[in-house]
Image: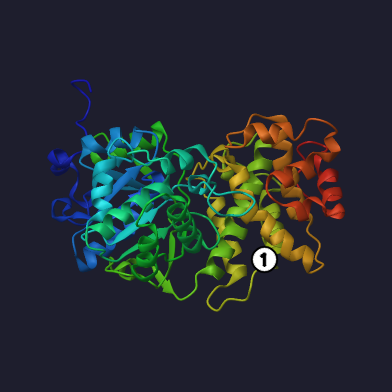
Amino acid sequence: MTADSPPRLSLATLDRVPAGSRPRTDPRGLRPRIVHLGIGAFHRAHQALYTEAAEAAHGGGWGIAGVTQRSRSVVDALRPQDGLYSFTERRPDGPATRVVGTVTEVLHATDDGARLSALLASPEVTVVTLTVTEKGYRRDTATGGLALDDPLIRDDLAGRPAPASVAGQLAAGLRARLRAGGAPVSLVSCDNMADNGAVLRRLVREFIAATAWDDRDRLLDWITGSVAFPASVVDRIVPATTDTDRRTAARALTVDDAGAVTGEPFTQWVLQDIFAADRPHWEAAGVRFVPDVSPYQLAKLRLLNGSHSLIAYLGLGHGCETVADVLATPWGEETVRAYCAEAAQSLPPTEGLDLPAYIDSLVDRFANPAMHHRIQQIAMDGSQKIPERWLAPLRELRAAGRDTPLLAAALAAWARRTRDHPLDDPRAEELRRAWDGPHTEAPRRLLRLLGAEDLADDTALIASVRAELDPRARPPR
């Protein structure tokens, strides 16, 4: 910081921030009652805002202890700022920036392992939420269960003092909680996975079952009666923060913010109403509590996330940089609508969910020129995302005898990317090797790598994918 630069955001400088941009509740009155694993931009632009709004409406002292799994960048950004950061809503008519004060402390999962374990054992903490991305769950692609041969899982099972995997952290935390008295708790996955609550429950239980702990059976019995795993659906487009975003925040706040995040105006959170213990009054903030989130989950995964992935891979092939760039092409909106119309045939009828209106809203959101959502970010980790976004509806539609030209084109766009460009993907080398040998067999090999033997053996589907692969960057027709 130079003599002319503004001071950094913190509790000490909060009074410099314009009154209308300060937190909705006093951060000093909060305590860690929620632990969040994966405190990246999405959590800070989504669940943390809902929690702040619920706190403003009903109180309860609901602060969040945020935990980063790998990089220390979030710790380095937020710890000097007392957990404060800003959120800028990217509205078409101009940005709106304010400070969020829900985060009470920021931890690194392994460096601060003792503190994390103490929080997970504390009866004051009654909710644990997660946004660790699909790959953070360390699932076996064939079984969907825990990948016991994953190096992080293997080392955690061997007794690493501070677990490095999410399953290991939660299992160790629940064990400490049981030993501390066994207060009930709810673990809420907020990642884009079908049946994310059931997936999380399975992975935690499988980790515990694989340990040599002498109390593992008692722990598993206690989890059955005292730990809830609500399913959830979250939705808000949160682009990676840029230097321009940080400058925008600094101008609005009159202080520098190293933890600034941005997001679109649209936001949604749907939660399964099966909590085991106290929780914030999120319903006052607009959260929808339902007995079954699966219809909302499927619509989001297959329409929003599925079309996002498709236009990301197509857009990269056409030199586009952002989602709005893709929607500005002659084929962008048509492709989104055609894809959604096809994928929507795999969705069950759901009371209160107007699919044509939902698809219209997706087009409007994607076309928002203020978002600057980089498609390179969306294209990351495709091998983890594609099975639920594309392969599940493919199976259902093909089993029903329906044509799937847009889903075949989507697979081809991704396959083309694995062939022609380096990937930011945990299985990048395996995907690259799928092109060794005759290229005509690569689509089958890629599908088999994704655990989709059935689709790899679908001759008509493979023929459709092959037909779309060249010319290289053709949008679907």
- Callout 1 environment at 10 Å: few (<14), some (14 to 19), or many (20+)? many
Residue at the outermost front position: 214
- Is residue 58 visible in the rendered structure shown here? yes
Which residue reaches farthest bottom? 351
Of residues 144 and 43, which is closer to you in this image? Answer: 144
Q: Residue 280 at x, y = what percent?
A: 28, 65
What is the x, y in percent for residue 333?
A: 66, 53
- Relative side of 411 to 196, left or right: right
Question: Quick one: SS at disc 1?
Answer: helix
Q: In front here: 152 or 308?
A: 152
User: Which residue position is annotated with label 1?
Assistant: 344
Q: At 40% across and 68% down in the image, what residue appears? A: 224
**Residue, far top:** 2
Q: Position of residue 10 (x, y in %)?
A: 19, 39
Left or right of residue 74, residue 368 in this image:
right
Q: Is residue 254 visible?
A: no
How many numbered marks appear? 1
Up/down of 326 relative to 393, above or below? above
Q: Residue at x 45, y 58 (%)?
A: 205
User: Colour scheme of this structure image?
Assistant: rainbow
Give left or right: position of 289 versus 376: left
In the rendered view, tell whether residue 187 sits above or below residue 93: below
Three-letter residue code for mark 1: Ala
Task: Residue 109: name its quadrant.
Answer: top left
At 84% across and 50% down in the image, what residue appears? 464
Snapshot quadrant of residue 190: bottom left
